[in-house]
Image: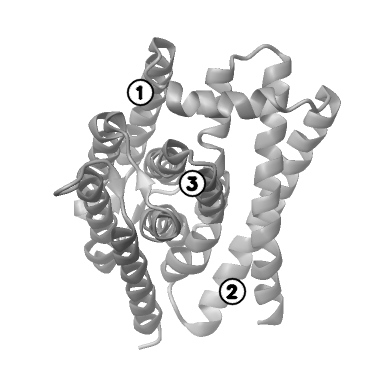
Amino acid sequence: MVLPTIAILVGLPVMLWSAGKFVDGSAGVAKHFGVSPLLIGMLIIGFGTSAPEIIVSIFAALEGNSGIALGNAFGSNIANIALVLGLTAVVSPIAVRSEIIKRELPVMLAIVFIAAWQLMDLVLSKDDAFTLLGLFVLLVGWSIWQGMKGSGDSLASEYSEQIESSSSPVKMNIVWLLAGLVLLIASSRILVWGAVEVAAHFGVSDTIIGLTIIAIGTSLPELASALIAVRKNEHDLALGNVIGSNMFNTLAVVGLAGTIHPTAIDSSFFYRDILIMVGVSVALFLFCIGIKKQGRLNRLEGGVFVLGYIGYTWYLINSAFI
């Protein structure tokens, strides 16, 4: 039990650190070879904070631990909205532009409903997985098209400034890219092994571990990015990171896990966790629309999210030991 605990405590921070270095190195190398800042921002940095989720889920699926893979993906979606945006809004209310309400939020909701509809039969099949991956390709193409038209400038321009401010030599970027990738893979495997062993020791399902420890841990990059963004008054970036990450988790992470290891899911997972994911996504949309004042996620709404997430996590932990 000591070694699995150490594996989690060491694997998680190493994984998060290496993911950041991998993204930084990838962006630097892409810039050196003339890739446009728009593509770097949307494809590398825009979805970069989801690197921990996708690597963990891939290795979990390869090892037959689909509970960790799906729990990590959908649990991260819940944590991103209820914990990350909730805490961020408590610290500083998040202003929401009308373009996000009209475009990104409805797209995220549509993706969430499609995934929930696919899993109503309690099976993640290869057909379901390939459909999600196909939608992911369409989403990336649509995002690039929107950005080239200029309607994606708010998020892409922020990333462009970050890319242009980086002056590391290409050799150093290559070193960070390779080192980050190796450490990301190694630490993810260590984390998955530790999580499975802890779950077995306490007699709880690996799904619960994926929904709690791993989901919260892999959502830390989003939390750090959101808090930094609102401190700089870049509210679009804080909200955009979470929306982009949730779409990536639902389409790419679940899609890849399903192609590797199609699986049946427990009815409790669908009627509890997936429906909660749908619920917090709808609540985010309604909060952003607002009743009296459109375009703001205020402290009260953020507090509701945080308290709801604490209650949800407490219920998961309690139910695991009953």
- Sequence-wise, the earlier of marks 2 and 1 is 1
Confirm or deny contact between disc 2 and disc 1 (CB under 8 A). no
Residue for badge 1: 138
Judge depth for marks 1 and 3 and give the one in front: 3
Which residue type carries mark 3?
Answer: Val
Kind of residue at badge 1 = Leu
Mark 3 — residue? 230
Q: Are marks 2 and 3 in contact (CB under 8 Å)?
A: no
Quarter location, residue 245: top left
For marks 2 and 3, the one nearer the N-term is: 2
Does residue 266 appear anywhere in the picture? no
Name the residue nearer the viewer: 214 or 197. Answer: 214
Label 1 element class: helix
Crowd tier of the residue under label 1, counting other residues whose Cα lies within 10 Å: few below 14, some 14–19, many 20 or above: few
Q: Is residue 231 visible?
A: yes
> Dot 3 surroundings within 10 Å: few (below 14), some, or many (20 or more)?
many
Q: Position of residue 302 (x, y in %)?
A: 34, 60
Please tell me the numbered disc located at residue 197.
2
Q: Are marks 1 and 3 in contact (CB under 8 Å)?
A: no
Of the 4 image quadrants, the one containing the N terminus is bottom right
